[in-house]
Image: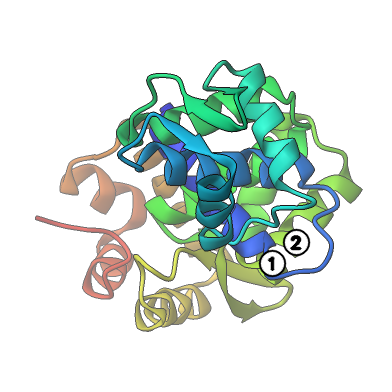
Amino acid sequence: MDKKTKGSWLIHHTNKLQGITNQAGYDKTFLAGKAGILLSAISSNNHATLNNDRLNVLAQAANINTTFELPKLIEVLKQQQLVDTANGGVAVLGVTTAKTLQHTADIFDALMPGASEVASIALAEKASIEPVLSGNVSTELADFYKLATPDIQRLMSDADQIGFVDAEDLGAGQRLLFNGNLFRRETTRKIKAVLDSLSSAEQIKLNELTDTLKKRACVSTDYATQLLGEPLFKKVAHRGFVWVP
């Protein structure tokens, strides 16, 4: 994942975290995201140096508490050598608005976040690429980020409740996770209808095809038909579960 994408997800997660009273477990995400939001606000200003009055106005407009949050955020930006403080104001050190997302990602990394916070970013990215089954993606993330069972369970619950991802209940303890800005719920319902209609043997074959597509990005229709069998291939292709040119 490139830094710009990572920074975008940090801002996204921070906006979601602002809607809850306790950001415990996502402190580094929230701090980096808030720092990025502040940096964007002050770097988009036409002046390289801002007095404290102007700084407070921009911070308030960005929904940043000037008493409790602003001093800490300025400290974080100074540590990254993105701003300096002098003469009752703040100087922006050559930062452009276009680079704020990359700087946000750098701030996050410098804060040394735990595995669960890093995994929350990966989860959002995966769900934005394509809808994913909660059981499958939780196993994948737990293995890759070495998360204990309680930690991955908490992450999946938090992601749903806080809104890091959108979710559709499939029943039987499974949920389909997706990005609601990219995938309509109608699309996820079509996917659910396909999954509900499959036998266990068909689900195994479809999972195998999905894993192959993740590794190769695309496969020939002949390969997919041979793996799934023609009836199953037609079913999933017709419902839009796989894309056929």
Q: Position of residue 189 (x, y in %)?
A: 43, 82
Does 39 sit left or right of 239 as displayed? right
Label disc, if present, on residue 52 of the rendered structure: none
Q: How many marks?
A: 2
Location of mark 2 (residue): 158
Q: Residue at x 34, y 65 (%)?
A: 182
What amino acid type is highlighted by mark number 2? Asp
Left or right for 233, reference 123: left
Asked if residue 47 lies left or right of residue 120, the reply is: left
Residue 106 lies in quadrant: top right
Residue drawn at the location 35% of the way across and 35% of the way down: 47
Q: Quadrant of the N terminus?
A: top left
User: Is residue 186 visible from the viewing direction of this image?
Assistant: yes
Depth order, front residue of 6/11: 11
- The residue lying furthest to the front in this view is 87
> Mark 1 falls on what kind of element?
helix
Label 2 with label 1: CB-CB less than 8 Å = yes
Q: Is residue 144 visible?
A: no
Q: Amino acid at mark 1?
A: Ile
Q: What percent of the width, then of the height, locates residue 143?
A: 72, 33
Please, what secondary structure does the residue beneath circle 2 have? helix
**For residue 244, above or below residue 76:** below
Q: Quadrant of the C terminus?
A: bottom left
Measured from the top left, where is residue 163 in percent x and y?
Answer: 62, 67
Residue 138 location (% of width, % of height): 69, 49
The Cα atoms of the two marked residues, 2 and 1, are separated by 6 Å
Residue tagged 1? 162
Camera-nearest residue between 67 and 29: 67
Q: Residue at x 53, y 56 (%)?
A: 57
